[in-house]
Image: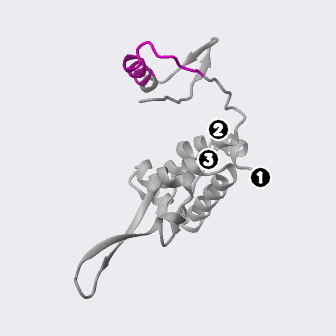
Amino acid sequence: MKSLSDTFTVSKGRPVWDSKFNTRFEELLKVNESKSFEIKVESIRDKAEHWQFKFYWGHLLPAIADECYSKVVLRAHYEMKKLYLNYSISSWSEIPEKHKSRIIPILRVITDSITGEMTEDICGYIRSTSTLSKDEFQEYIHKIQGLIIDMGIQVSFSEEAMEMYRRGCAA
C-alpha cells in the first residue's frame, strides 16, 4: 500500500476516522518505517461529487436493492453500471487512457471456423463510477431515477436524502 485516502468528520475540533481507516493507516506506517509522507486535508462539503456519491450509495441504490436485488446494494450497483455505463468498442485502444485501470472488460469468444481455435476479443467495457465527472454522474443518477419511475417503484426519500440530491445533482 503506497497511498491512503479517506474522508473523516470533525467532532469537538478533532478528526473522527472510521475504524477501517485506522487499521489501514497503521499498516501503512508499519511497512514504511522512517519514510516521509505528505498529508493533504481538503474540505469536501461543497463538492457536488461528494454529495452525489452519498446520495447514490446511501439512498438511491438501497431503494433499488430493496425492490429488485434482495436488498443487496452492491448487486444493484453492478446492475446499474451494466445498464448505463456500458460502452461498445472494437479494440482496447478505444478505451480512454484515464479509464483503463478502472474498467470491467466485456469479452466475446471468437471461434475460428476452420481450426476451431477459440480466442477472446474485447467488445466493450463497463466504466467505474469513480471516473465519472460531476455532469456524467448527474446524468447517471437521472437515468437510474428514470428506471425507478418506469418500473413503478415507489420511493420516498428522506429530507436528508433530498438535501444530498440538491447539493450534488440539482441543476
Separation of residues labelled 3 and 1 (CA atoms): 18 Å
The residue drawn where x is 47% and y is 16% is 35
| Residue identified by numbered label 3 | 157
What's the residue at 44%, 21% (across, down)? 25
What kind of residue is marked 2?
Glu
Residue, disc 1: 171
Quadrant assignment, res 85: bottom right
* Residue occupying the point 57% across, 50% down: 131
Q: Residue furthest right?
A: 171
**Mark 3 / mark 1, whichever is N-terminal:** 3
Instruction: Judge whether residue 24 is colored magenta.
Output: yes
Residue 100 locus on image (x, y percent): 50, 54
Q: What is the C-alpha distance between the residues marked 3 and 2?
A: 8 Å
Range drawn in magenta: 22-39
Q: Nearer the viewer, mark 1 or mark 2?
A: 1
Amino acid beneath label 3 = Phe
Give the foreground label among 3 and 1: 1
What secondary structure is found at the residue carrying circle 2?
Answer: helix
**Rendering quarter of residue 24:** top left
C-alpha gap between disc 1 and disc 2 = 18 Å
Is residue 56 toward the left or the right of residue 170 in the image?
A: left
23 or 119, nearer to the observer: 119
Circle 1 packing at 10 Å, graded few (<14), some (14-19), many (20+), is few
Q: Which mark is residue 160?
A: 2
Quadrant including the N terminus = top left
Q: Earlier in the sequence, mark 1 or mark 2?
A: 2
Question: How many C-alpha atoms fall within 10 Å of the one at disc 3: few (<14), some, or many (≥20)?
Answer: some
* Nearer-the-camera pick, 129 or 153: 129
Residue with the most extreme bottom position: 114
Along the horizontal axis of the image, is 35 left or right of 164? left
